Amino acid sequence: MPRRPFGQEGQQQASLGEEQLVEKQLKDLGVSPTVIQKLKSRSMLTMRDMRYVVAMTPDELIDELALTSYEQAYKLQEAAKRIIGYRNTLVTASQLAQQKATAPSLLTTGVKSIDELMGGGLSGGEIYEFAGEFGTGKTQLSHQLSVTVQLPRDQGGFGAKAVYIDTETTFSPERIEAMAKRFGVENALDNIYVYRPLNTGELEYFVRHDLNTLLDQGVRLVVVDSVIALYRAQFKGLEWLSRRQQAINYLLDWLKRWGRIYGAPVIITNQVLTHPLPSGIALKVPAGGNIIAHASTHRFFLKKSGDTWIIECIDSPRIAKGATAEYVIKDDGVWDA
């Protein structure tokens, strides 16, 4: 795996002390010298790399490190989990409820009505899909969240950075500055990483191999605007549909893995398509089919309604289907209607 190209030079090259510590911990936890040497040869002996090991499936790990058995992969992953303090234990439903009640604060959208619709804001480790036609506010809301995540926790933020994966070249520094002035956030542009992939290959490589570097550097919001654009353009024809859906599913799966490990909300914006009904009525529905529908934790449809806009919940494990909130779009972002 190539060295990751993001972050400060001193952060790219892990300190010798950190590498030695991780190597010693792996030895103490029973990982074989052969496997440790494979990690060493790929410069994968940092805490960040241990999170990458935990995120992979055993089959991916065997392929990545050229391991010879499933047992080697399992032992390495269990050791990596111990090193980074990751726990995925069996709990009762009441324990899960308690964990959610004591979880870090929710991320505000900066719009009271939308926060109330979402139960207080966005939760870490969950995927939020915003679908809608052009001009309905998907990108504006994504920009605004990239600003509000920088707010301190007592103001509804995470005091953190954002990464904005811009597949349609719609990211606007000017809009960010206007929103930052509104929310009183200084140096907002310095705390947003923007990546513009040229094709689906670059997008997938970035999410799998580079995104956790930024998460390690304080990013706690991931935005993909939009998740479908490159796939619709570059997987043309029905003969490519199956491969396209598999590729989108794999991308979303990696986004979900990183979101859970780092506790970061993931925002994906989505385009719409026209779905004709036998009655002759044509419905606007989110693109991507069941793949995106099943991967998203919460799905919202954004639409224009007279002088205001409406965001409607179309699927969620805890928000009522059909629940709505009204908003308006101004020069400095999204506001309550």
Image (cartoon, rainbow, N blue to C red):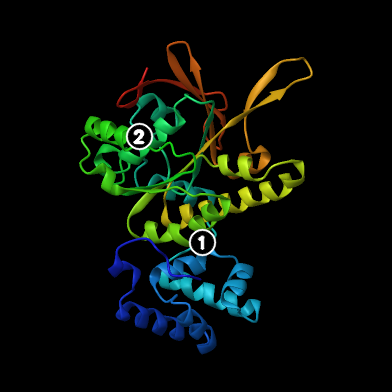
Residue 33 x/y as whole percent: 50, 89
Q: Which residue is mark 1?
A: 88
Q: Residue at x 43, y 60 (%)?
A: 212
Q: Residue at x 49, y 39 (%)?
A: 168
Disc 2 residue crowd, few under 14, some 14–19, many 20+, Cα 10 Å: many
- Find residue 18 and report its image quarter: bottom left
Mark nearest the camera among 1 and 2 is: 2
| Secondary element at tag 1 | loop
Residue 317 x/y as whole percent: 56, 38
Whether residue 49 is situated above or below residue 130 in the rendered picture? below
Along the polypeptide, which appears first: circle 1 or circle 2? 1
Residue type, numbered disc 1: Asn
Q: Residue furthest bottom?
A: 33
Inter-mark Cα distance, 1 to 2? 32 Å
Residue 56 x/y as whole percent: 55, 65
| Secondary element at tag 2 | helix
Q: Which residue is mark 2?
A: 144
Residue type, numbered disc 2: Gln
Residue 282 x/y as whole percent: 69, 19
- Find residue 336 and report its image quarter: top left
Of residues 271 and 289, the one drawn nearer to the viewer in this rendering: 271
Whether residue 146 is situated above or below residue 320 in the rendered picture? below
Disc 1 residue crowd, few under 14, some 14–19, many 20+, Cα 10 Å: few
Q: Is residue 119 visible?
A: no
Whether residue 79 is situated above or below residue 211 in the rendered picture? below
